[in-house]
Amino acid sequence: MAFSKVDESTFVATIYADAMLDQDYRLGDGVCHRELRSVNAWLTATSAKTDTRYVVN
């Protein structure tokens, strides 16, 4: 998921839910119907492993 900076305190990301296909996974329960209910992301200032990670949802 890529974020774009709008201003100093606002970022946006586009989430595509149309790739979630209803399928029969052969588990004996028939077709699974999928629905996007939430999206979570971890944000850091840099890619350093020591950075504090912030969860957004």
Image: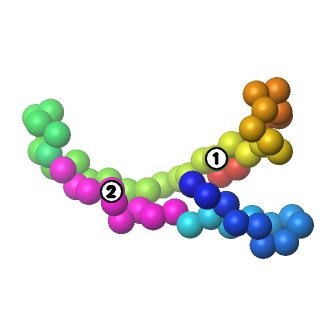
Q: Nearest the camera: 2 or 35?
A: 2
Hey, which quadrant is residue 11 in on the image?
Answer: bottom right
Q: Is residue 28 left or right of residue 8?
A: left
CB atoms of marks 1 and 2 within 8 Å: no
- The magenta-colored residue range is 15-23
Q: Which mark is residue 41?
A: 1
Seen in the picture, residue 23 relative to 14 is either above or below; the reply is above
The type of residue carrying mark 2 is Met
Which residue lies at the image location 37% right of the left edge and 57% below the top edge?
35
Q: Position of residue 14 (x, y in %)?
A: 56, 66
Quadrant assignment for the N terminus: bottom right
Label the magenta part by its dominant secondary structure. loop
The reply to whether residue 54 is in sight is: no
**CA neighbours of label 2 inside 10 A, class few (<14), some (14 to 19), many (20+):** few
| Type of colouring | rainbow
The reply to whether residue 32 is in sight is: yes
Q: Position of residue 37 (x, y in %)?
A: 48, 55
Q: Earlier in the sequence, mark 1 or mark 2?
A: 2
Q: Nearest the camera: 13 or 29?
A: 13
Q: Which mark is residue 20?
A: 2
Q: Is residue 50 left or right of residue 4?
A: right
Local SS, label 2: loop
Seen in the picture, residue 36 relative to 44 is either above or below; the reply is below
Instruction: Find the residue positioned furthest to the bottom.
Output: 6
Is residue 56 a member of the stretch shown in magenta? Answer: no
Q: Position of residue 55 (x, y in %)?
A: 71, 43
Q: Position of residue 53 (x, y in %)?
A: 77, 37
Hey, which quadrant is residue 6 in on the image?
Answer: bottom right
